[in-house]
Amino acid sequence: MVVVATREALPLAKAKIHLFYRDSNSDVAEFLSNRDIDSSTGSLRTGPDGRLVLDRVPEGEYVWTINGGEASGEFEVLLGEENVLRIALQG
């Protein structure tokens, strides 16, 4: 799950999330278009509650950016864990 919020801790709806899967040098958008993963919003944008839930995401290392580079970072998905990425935008 990805949770995006403003500096004031308000949910950020429709935030565009770009995910890159390092293990296979793949854009996660390709996984979604190929139906290899599922998205709670049908896209890689957050819902009205600032959340995006992705199912069947492969274990491994990921790089993320929000809204074309407003924020970025890295995280790891572990199998059998509830993987939550919380992003608080500074701007």
Image (cartoon, rainbow, N blue to C red):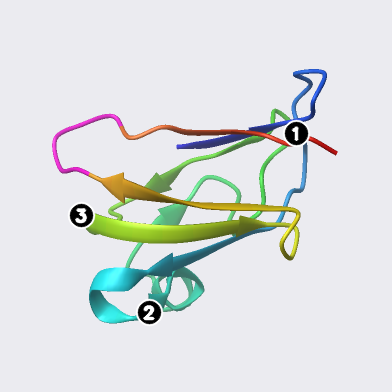
The 10 Å Cα crowd at callout 1, few under 14, some 14 to 19, many 20 or more, is: few
Residue designated by label 2: 26
> In the structure shown, which secondary structural element does the residue marked by tag 3 occupy?
loop
- The type of residue carrying mark 1 is Pro
Q: Can residue 67 be seen in this view?
A: yes
Q: Answer with mark 3 or mark 2, whichever residue precedes in sequence.
A: 2
Cα–Cα gap, marks 1 and 2: 27 Å
- Residue at horizontal 60%, vertical 49%? 41
Q: Name the image quarter holding the N terminus.
A: top left
Q: In this view, does 48 lie to the left or right of 75?
A: right
Q: Position of residue 91 (x, y in %)?
A: 85, 39
User: Residue 70 is drawn in which quadrant?
Assistant: bottom right
Q: Which residue matches tag 3?
A: 59
In magenta, the rendered stretch is 78-82
Residue 8, image x and y in percent?
82, 18
Amino acid at dot 2 = Ser
Identify the residue at horizontal 39%, vertical 72% (top origin): 31
Front tag of 1 and 3: 3
Nearer the N terminus, badge 1 or badge 2?
2
Please state the horizontal and vertical placement of residue 72, each as a whole percent of the image: 60, 54
Q: In which quarter of the image is residue 51?
A: top right
In x, y percent, where is residue 49?
70, 28
Q: Is-magenta flag for residue 44?
A: no
Q: What element carries label 2?
A: strand
Specify few, some or many for label 3: CA neighbours under 10 Å numbering under 14, 14-19, or 20 or more: few
Q: Nearer the viewer, residue 38 or 84?
A: 84
Q: How far apart are marks 3 and 2 (CA)?
A: 13 Å
Relative to residue 34, is residue 67 drawn left or right? right
Determine whether 64 is above or below 15 in the image.
below
